[in-house]
Every structure is written in structure tokens, then in C-alpha cells.
Image (cartoon, grey):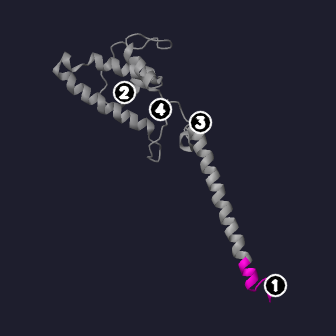
Amino acid sequence: AESEGVGPASAGAEEGEEEEELEEDAEEAEEAKEAEEAKEAEGENDVDEDDRLGEDCIKLLTAEEAEAPYRNYMKNGKGEEGLPFAPECPTDRLAVERLLDNRAPQTCLKLVQRVRTRTAAALGLENRKKLESFFLALLDFSINIMARSDGDISARGMQ
């Protein structure tokens, strides 16, 4: 029976092999950890897999790009010919959609700022209600363009 590897001598050999495998696995894990720490020290590990998931998605505005229209919102830029300087304050989602539809994100920000300027609460008491309605309509518009047909919210339409 011992010649077939069933006896006590073969059982001890199997335990020795398992211990060697465990030691090898521990060494590999330690080497991987050291390599990762070295990458972090060099700054190569700043982007993980989660950060890479959105690389092929639509490009959203950076804080600097989003701020640019507010600095110079009364000047029409390239491709913004015919953009209204004093648009009426939209009070429902469809009116907001007509104002912002098929426009670049920076142009949309510029139009929102122009509406807010024209409808400033300091200019009249009725403007406060208009701005409240505009905010709700803008929120409704944003949710509507991001919602998929199954009701899930995504980045669709945020171009």
C-alpha cells in the first residue's frame, strides 16, 4: 500500500508540498504589494480601474471650462451667432428645452446666466417666482435628458 502513495510517508510529502505552495503564494503576494507600493511612490498608480471606466464616455466640462461663460457671458463666441442676449425666462421644461436644445455645454451655461441676469430678483418682485419656476424647469430638463427609457439615470445627453 505504501508503494501506491497511500501510507504515512506519502501523506507527509503532500503536507510538505502544500506548505511550499502556501509559502510561494505568500511570497508572490508580498512581491506584488511591494511593486504596488513602488508604483505609488513613483506616482504611476494615480489612476485605478474605476477611473478608467469613464475614459470612453462623453467629456464633461472641467471647473475652469464651466466658469468661462460666467466671466464673459454677454459676448457671443465662435459658433454662437444668433444667440439671444436677453432671453425670456422659461418656466417649464419644454421652454427650457427649446432654449438649450442642441447647444454646446458652454453655450447652455451662458444662456442660463443671461436668463438669470435678465430675470434678477432685484429687478422686480415677480422675478423671484419666475426664477423659482426656471430652476425647477431646468432641473426637470436635466433629469429628462439624463434618464434612459428604463428610468435609470445616466450621463446620456450631457454633451
Q: Earlier in the sequence, mark 3 or mark 2?
A: 3
Please provide percent x and percent y for residue 74.
Answer: 37, 11
Please provide percent x and percent y for residue 28.
Answer: 66, 55
Q: CA separation, marks 2 and 4?
A: 15 Å
Q: Earlier in the sequence, mark 3 or mark 4?
A: 3
Foreground tag (3 vs 2): 3
Q: Amino acid at mark 4?
A: Met
Q: Check residue 158 in the rendering and tell me which mark sits there, or answer none.
A: 4
User: Measured along the vertical axis of the image, is residue 30 above or below residue 92?
Assistant: below
Please provide percent x and percent y for residue 13.
Answer: 74, 76
Foreground tag (1 vs 4): 1
SS category of the residue bearing label 1:
helix
Q: Check residue 4 in the rendering and tell me which mark sits there, or answer none.
A: 1
| Residue at numbered disc 2 | 96
The answer to if 7 sits in the magenta stretch is: yes
| Residue at numbered disc 3 | 42
